[in-house]
Each structure stands twice: as structure tokens, then as C-alpha cells.
Image (spheres, rainbow, N blue to C red):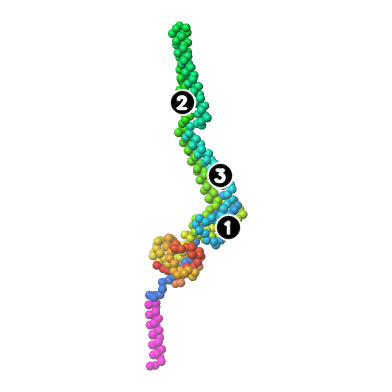
Amino acid sequence: MKPQRIVIAGLVALALLFLGWRLLAPQFRPAPTLSGYIEGETLYLSAPVAGTVTQLGVRRGQRVAAGAPLFEIEPDQRLAQRDQAEAELTAALAQAEDARKGQRPVELGILEADLAAAEAQAREARANLRRVGALVDKGIYAKARLDDARNQSQSADARVAAARRRVAAATLGDREDQIRAADARVAQARAGVTETGARLKDMAPVAPAAARVEDVFFQRGEWASANQPIVALIPDDRVFVRFFVPETEVAAYKPGQKIEFSCDACAGALSATIVYVSPRPEFTPPIIYSREARDRLVFMVEARPENGARLVPGLPVDVTPL
């Protein structure tokens, strides 16, 4: 065989191999990996009033459990307000209880003594009426004297009836409208105690969930203005995977679906649940690279990992396409 034919045959074989590789390689080529990173939503905690930071229970980078104390703003003024509210509640409860009772025994004794005196005067008036009546019948007294005695007896009986009503009223409680007013004061005092308790909690907030302390802006002894962040947290339930999907594939990604992702510092493949798919396209940011990206128009997708406590915000990840 001539050397020219050998060279031609070799070139033809190479061309056939190249053509076969171009035709068959896409079938065996792994799916392009989507790139993204770990993101965390920061939660800023502050106090509603200005004051000195008297207690600081966390440091930057520390992990805290749900309910862990974070810091405390000087509580002396709020403690005094709470004590005042509790005292007002105690007084209101005593007044409401007193409104349902009768008068004190000493006061009731005075009214009963008045009743006894009225009854004695009534007996004396009736006895006088009988004496005057007998003398009028004998013609010793004029009939007008009998009328006066009768009027005095009736007046004495009326005073007895009035005294009995006062004693009966004294054994009862206050009127219903007064009792309702006393109960309203109790409710108002209870609300005051609740309000001061809530304000005290605002002065010493706790971690709403397990979280990582991202930053501490004030130290113990420093003055913090009202509503100025003192501690910044990244709760575990606010850590998510953010990645970008080409516009030709975004229709396959829906909230509720599971995705798998990996990172250099992660042990094995991890999973997350898609919670958000952006309705607006954007151009791929310069720091996001896709190994085999063909289009720069992408949609942002966010997914909640199953264990956000193990993931560090800012960490790059590779997401396996659906």
C-alpha cells in the first residue's frame, strides 16, 4: 500500500471518529450543574426604648438556642412601673371585693342602734296615744290632743320602717352599676400589669429560634438608642439555597419540589425544598458561573435546606438539575 493511501485512510478514520464523538457525546455528557450559594436572612433585634446595655449574653459567631437571652436594657424604670401596676391591681381587686359586701360591723352596729332607738320611740308614741285616747274619751283632753298623739305615733312608725330599710341595705353589697364599675377597674389594672410585663420582655428579648449570631453592635455599658439593632441573628429556618436556572429550564422548577445540592465543605449530597421561583428573569451575575452555560438569561430560585444549622451563608453550592 502506498504511503499516500495510508495517510488518506488515517485522515478518514479520524474524521469518522470526530463525527461519531460529536453525535454521541451529548448522550453521555453529564447534565450541567447549576451554581448558587447559601444565603441567610438576617434578623435584627433591638429595644423599643433607649438605655444602657446592662447585660449581653451572646458573642459574634455563637450559636444560640430558641429562647436564649440575648441582651438587656436597664430595666429599673420598667420594674418600678410593673410594681405600680401590680399595686393598682391589688387595690382594684380589694375594692371590687368590698363592693360585693355589706358595710363593716361597726357601721352596721350604728344603724342597728338607730333602729332600736326608733322602735323605742315608736313604743313610747303608741303608749302615749293610748293614754291620750283614754283621757279624750273621759273628756279631760280635747280631741285635737288625740290627733297630735296619733300623728306622733305614725311618725315614729315611719322612722322605724326607714331605720329597718337602712339596716337591710347595709347588709347588701353596692348597686350593680357600682360593682360593674369596680370590675372594670380590675380589668384595667390587669391590662396595665400585662402591658408593663410586655415592656419588660421588650427590654430583654430572647432568641425567637435556634440561630447563629451574625454580629453584636453594642457592648455592655454602652448607650443604645431606641429601635437601634443591638444583636443580629441568622435563624436556622431562614437559611436557604439560592441558585439560578436558565430560562429554557425554569418551567421545571416549582415550589414544593425537592432538589439536591453539594458544596466543598458538605459531607455528601444534601437536599432542599423549593420555596420561591422568581417571576422575573435577570442576567447572570458576574460571580455566578455555570460550567456549560449557553444563555445568560436566568431565573433565581430559592430552596429551604433540611438542616440550615450546618450551612454557612456565602458558601458556594452546586445544584443538580431536575
Q: Nearer the viewer, residue 197 or 107?
A: 107
* Residue at (56% x, 60% y) in the render: 59
Q: Is the magenta stretch mostly helix, strand or loop?
A: helix
- The answer to whether the residue labelled 1 contacts the one labelled 3, judged by CB atoms less than 8 Å apart, is no
Mark 3 / mark 2, whichever is N-terminal? 3
Quarter holding the C terminus is: bottom left
- Mark 2 belongs to which amino acid? Arg
Q: Quadrant of residue 296?
A: bottom left
Q: Does residue 41 appear anywhere in the picture?
A: no
- Mark 1 belongs to which amino acid? Phe
Q: State the CA–CA distance, disc 1 to disc 2.
A: 72 Å
Q: Which mark is residue 83?
A: 3
* Residue at (57% x, 56% y) in the render: 56
**Pointer 2: what residue?**
165
Q: Please state the horizontal and vertical placement of residue 162, each as a whole percent of the image.
A: 47, 23
Q: What element carries label 1?
A: loop
Q: Which residue lies furthest to the right in this view?
A: 221
The span shown in magenta is 1-25
**Pointer 1: what residue?**
217
